[in-house]
Image: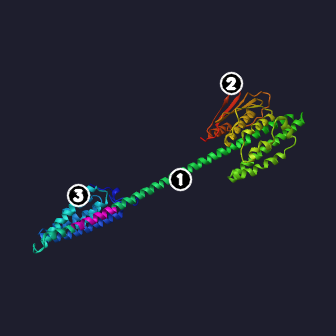
Amino acid sequence: MTVTGAEIAGGGQGPPRLWWWERPRSFVFDLALGLLSAVECAVLGARFAGEAGVPVVALVLLGFVAGGLLVVRRRWPIAVVLVAVAILPADMGYSMLVVGLYTLAAFEMPRRVTGVLAGMSGLGVFVVTVVRLNHLRDDPTSQPDWVVWLIAGLMSVGMIAPPLLLGMYAGARRRLVESLRERADGLERELSLLAERAEERAEWARSEERTRIAREMHDVVAYRVSLMVVHAAALEAVAVRDPQQAVRNAALVGDMGRQALTELREMLGVLRTGDGGRAVPAVRAAAPSVVREAPLAARPAAADGGLVAVGAVRGAEADGHGPCLDELDALVGECRVSGMAVELSVDGESATYAAEVEQTVYRVVQEALTNVHKHAPGAKVQVRLAHRGTEVAVLVLNGPADGVAANADLPSGGNGLIGMKERVTALGGGCVWGTTDAGGFKVSAVLPASGTRG
């Protein structure tokens, strides 16, 4: 039976292997052991040859070759032990036997094989010791036989047990070190994998945050700017023939521009501080002062057309909350002032929903109305809000453009509907849109009341 290089103590990742040695120093160490064993066996063989009357050269050569086999102890430890047991009767090979038993116990050899070879070695040492003691006694009757057996037994145990125990300890220690090394390598790989996953999650979070910011910026800017463009076009059309109407339209454009700037300041304040709870109220507090500075001509127009003042529209945001369902009336009123025919209907009993649900419903209606401004000027619009207990639904339906209202030629990036669907889906709801048989367009969304995130 052989022992592979992977079973040798201290197998590392250092210099290149030399045959079955893991490191060059192991080769040098075994070579030195083999040379010492060969010299010892040759000297003991020469002494035994003189006592036994055997040719000295033959035993010296036998001892040198047999002792030199200790060089291959890592490769063939069983063969080394067997050769050592075989040359014990010639009174040589003791050191070879000790080292061979140590190597046998230290390496991953079957315990049964190690036990058999240890028993053979112990018996061989016992027999050879008894024979030597009987041969050295001048008077065999001077000492009882049990004394000889006791000395031989102690000699056998003293030569066999220590190397076996030391080898088993070294093997167990090596296996423990290898296990700890493998565990450390595994932990290092796991840490590297966790670091890679953390980087991936961070990149995903950055991407999600960029998408969210882009969606918020679109919701804040697109609607207000669209209305500003519509009113600017109307202002251009009536500036000469109806100066009073032109003044009212100019006032509305100014109001809407101030609202857009206020909302932008709120968002930029959050981005700068990273804590919307502290930054936003301070910035939102500027909204009422902006309203007070609005031209007086804007207020009669708002009253005639149902437009609620800017401070009322943004009142819910002044206390730290985003748009809510109560602000839909104001949103519809703004659109009516711009000339859009909008009808708002509410079904079911009003309920309290999560803040993000109400804000998302508001943004869905806002985006749908913005698209009507862009793509269907003059179209009639129906906004239907339904309270269904565990969920809230909204439908925005518009007919085709009437062909009379001027097209404001507003640009479209195609991101509004996508962002709207992302908002709704993130809260566990559903959102669909598409054209109608009458040539119009409809947007529908359903959200759970609790706003459970999917």
Q: Nearer the viewer, mark 2 or mark 3?
A: 3
Calculate the distance from the C-alpha at mark 1 to the C-alpha at mark 3: 52 Å
> Mainly helix, strand or loop, the magenta region?
helix
Most foreground residue, 390 or 306: 390
Q: Which mark is residue 195?
A: 1
> Callout 1: helix, strand or loop?
helix
Q: Is residue 335 left or right of residue 143?
A: right
Q: Which mark is residue 176?
A: none
In the image, is residue 407 above or below residue 148?
above
Figure colour scheme: rainbow
Can residue 7 be seen here? The reply is yes
10 Å crowding of disc 1: few (<14), some (14-19), many (20+): few
The spot of residue 97 in percent (x, y) is 24, 64
Q: Which residues, given as a range, are shown in magenta?
A: 155-170
Which quarter shows the N terminus? Answer: bottom left
Rendering quarter of residue 422: top right
Residue at 77% across / 44% down in the picture? Answer: 315
> Callout 3: helix, strand or loop?
helix
Q: Is residue 176 left or right of residue 287?
A: left
The spot of residue 159 in percent (x, y) is 24, 67
For the residue marked with disc 1, what is the amino acid? Answer: Ala
* Furthest-top residue in this view: 437
Q: Which residue is mark 3?
A: 116
- Badge count: 3
The spot of residue 86 in percent (x, y) is 19, 62
Determine if the magenta segment contains residue 312. no
Most foreground residue, 448 or 224: 448
Q: Which residue is mark 2?
A: 437
